[in-house]
Amino acid sequence: MVLVDLVADGTTLGAVTGALTEWAADERVDVNALRRRIRFVGIVWRRKTSPNTWRWNQHAEWLEPFGRAVVKNVSIPGTLWDYLGNKQSKVSRTQPISKWQNDEWRFEPPRDAENLESLRLALRIYNHAGTAQDREQFSRELAEQPAVSESWLRTLIGELRKTA
């Protein structure tokens, strides 16, 4: 299971993880097995790198039972992060942690014009990525990224090329 989030400080990922492990314990599922299967991808605001750069996952105490190796961060320009996290219309309502237990609120999907437009955009992106030509072009662009030295990216590129 991979949990992905725009991450400023890891609070939401920590809350989701806490809810999952609590649920697993309530259902008598092996919590340690669950922890071995969870990975985290943090979409983070690109900043200048240095040994002193603040990294959310180095300060998230809730990560300790998982080990630090389960976290990958993808840094994106601040303008994109701001657009995705703050300005883009969402496909669902914002779900603050305080509302998670409110079943009626949680299961009422929004149907206003902004949310419907976001759903249409998501569908267009999904359909666009469905062509072999687009996947091949995307894999070529990924292969030009500095992160290609990471094995996970080479694996992703290989998987994309198999389906192109």
Image (cartoon, rainbow, N blue to C red):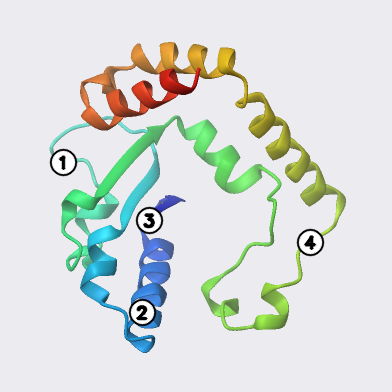
Q: Earlier in the sequence, mark 3 or mark 1?
A: 3
The kind of residue on which mark 3 rests is Met
Viewer-closest of 58 and 100: 100
The span from disc 4 to disc 3 (Cα, nearest Å) is 27 Å
Q: In the rendering, at what x and y percent does residue 87 appear? A: 65, 43
Mark 4 vs mark 2: which is more N-terminal? Answer: 2
Q: Which residue is mark 2?
A: 24
Q: Amino acid at mark 2?
A: Ala
Q: Amino acid at mark 4?
A: Pro
Observer-side mark, 3 or 1, equals: 3
Give the residue number, with chain letter if any, for mark 4.
110
Let me know if residue 130 appears in the view: yes
Comes first in the chain, label 4 or label 3: 3
- In the picture of the structure, the residue carrying the numbered disc 3 is 1
Q: CA distance from mark 3 to mark 1?
A: 31 Å
Per the rendering, the mark at residue 164 is none
